[in-house]
Image: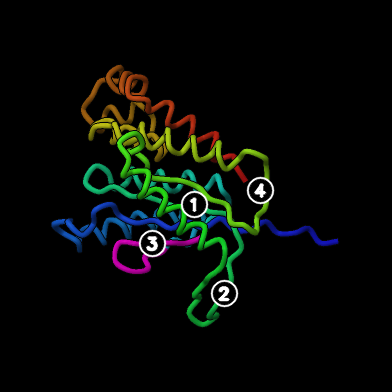
Amino acid sequence: MAEMKPPPIVVIGDVVGSRTAAHRGRLHDRLSAALAETNRRWDADLRITVGDEYQGTLPSLGAATAAVLWLRVALLPEHDLRHGIARGDVRILDSRTGVQDGPGWWAARAAIDEVHDLAGRPATRGARTTYREADDVGGGPAPGLPGALRAALLARDELVGRLDERSLSVLRGLLAGRTQREIAAELGLSGSAVSQRVRRDGIGVVLQTTAWLEDLG
């Protein structure tokens, strides 16, 4: 008996407050470049659909959680992003154009709408990412996974949202695989100053959380 293929992981993202951006063309170019790098690193097919919105599929839930962090950090502090991640079936509506529909996309849309709602509340205004499972997934791969993942994403968003420009540069470098020594040289800082930021600003927690999440299938 053939093994059932798990439902795909889909992502919908957009730029927070993009309508007020002073240079929309420049924003579009930066987002396009970040999406191209993300697709290369995580074997994704994220693409801009209209205006400031983009969507696509990723090979695993872990890859999606890492990719959306990379995208967000690539554009901060000038622009911020929000993402809805979902697991669920998708359907090809038009094989010629590649237009898709289905429960996975509906769940991703519900997730990004929920992020918008969470960010509108004082207690959770740092929310930028959440996760939903489509109804067709049932209980999911592990009991309690959706709630635990949503909690981890919310906490990670809060930490990232508190970083200043210099600490964002440190996080961006570490996510790109550079060493603290290399980052210190690039930023004109001492090695101890970079290490202090990693500890004090929660960058180490962001990295460890992301590493654990990336193991998700």
Nearest the eye: 97 or 33 = 97
Q: Which residues are magenta?
A: 47-57
- Tag 3: amino acid: Tyr
Which of marks 2 and 3 precedes in the sequence?
Answer: 3
According to the picture, the residue beneath numbered tag 2 turns out to be 92
- Residue 72, given in percent of the width and then of the height, sits at 35, 46
Q: CA distance from mark 4 to mark 2?
A: 23 Å
Q: Secondary structure at mark 2?
A: strand
Residue at image position (35%, 62%) is 53
Q: CA distance from mark 1 to mark 3?
A: 12 Å
Magenta run includes residue 55: yes
According to the picture, the residue beneath numbered tag 3 turns out to be 54
Which of marks 2 and 4 precedes in the sequence?
Answer: 2
Label 4 CA crowd tier, 10 Å (few <14, some 14–19, many 20+): some
Q: Secondary structure at mark 3?
A: strand
Nearest the eye: 120 or 141 = 120
According to the picture, the residue beneath numbered tag 1 turns out to be 85
